[in-house]
Image (cartoon, rainbow, N blue to C red):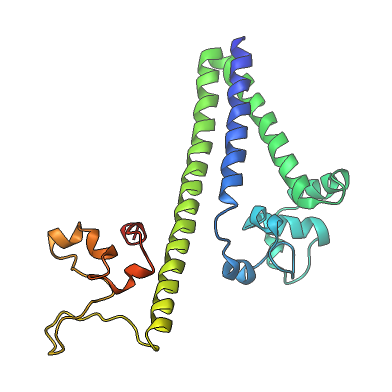
Amino acid sequence: MSANGRVWSVVFWTKVLMALVVTAALWAQFNLGQFHNAFASWPPGGNATLASRFSTWDVAHYLRLSESGYKAGSKSRAFYPLWPAAIRVATVLAGGRPVLAAMLLTNALSLLAFRMLYRLVERHCGPEVSRDSLIGILAALLLPALGRARAAAQGAQCASDLRQLRQAWTMYSDDSNGQLPCNTDGQDGMGVFTNWVAGTMSRANDATNTHLLIDPSESSLSRYIPSPGIYARH
């Protein structure tokens, strides 16, 4: 494979990897509160859909402008008309699907920009510098996407753990005539009871002893949360 072919192979696989990262991020929890409170959302005036995940922030403004144009008092009027006009034209070719049109346009134009950059740097600095520059730019684009995907995955895991904790407290209350598990240290005249979890983080031995979290004689919630991982991740 020629040097030029290797460069475009890097571009292609970087695009594929970014697509996989975006697809993985779709499993993360969507912020519906932010969606409904945003100055512009897509679809306008409706509930969040799969397309809404690809249409946050400025994208929603551009999509709304491409569909209904500029209106007095609209928060979207601060955006320039070239990109909404391009999306409007591409929407016709995409069968009336503006989000798909915008995604196709964005990827096609980014590939064109990469090619123009490669040729420009190659003309002035040679093919090796051009190749390294392009790879560097692609890495700079990819790393933040990977970071956001990791953060999204962590957020989804955190939400799942908190949901299980909430369910454990509810189940304990249902099984205990509406009472909540104890949280006493025996210094209030009530004696020492089995708390919701045992130990204290200020003691080194307790802070690393996961047995205190899952032993029924030490933790009231251990019947409902058999794994210490939920606590360890927080």
Residue at image point 62% right, 66% down? 35
Q: Return the residue nearer the eye: 108 or 16.
A: 16
Q: Is residue 170 left or right of residue 213?
A: right
Q: Is residue 218 left or right of residue 108?
A: left
Residue 56 is situated, as x and y percent measured from the top left of the image, at: 63, 57
Residue 116 is situated, as x and y percent measured from the top left of the image, at: 66, 25
Q: Is residue 126 visible?
A: no
Residue 169 is situated, as x and y percent measured from the top left of the image, at: 39, 76
Rendering quarter of residue 187: bottom left
Q: Is residue 10 left or right of residue 186?
A: right
Q: Quadrant of the C terminus?
A: bottom left
Q: From the viewer's perspective, is residue 165 above or below residue 181?
A: above
Residue at image point 38% right, 78% down? 172
Residue 124 is situated, as x and y percent measured from the top left of the image, at: 56, 16
Q: From the viewer's perspective, is residue 199 above or below residue 108?
A: below
Rendering quarter of residue 72: bottom right
For the image, the number of numbered tags is 0
Q: Is residue 202 visible?
A: yes
Q: Return the residue nearer the eye: 60 or 216.
A: 216
**Extreme-top residue of the structure:** 2
Residue at image point 37% right, 60% down? 230
Q: Quadrant of the N terminus?
A: top right
Rendering quarter of residue 214: bottom left
Residue at image point 74% right, 40% down? 104
Q: From the viewer's perspective, is residue 12 above or below residue 68?
A: above
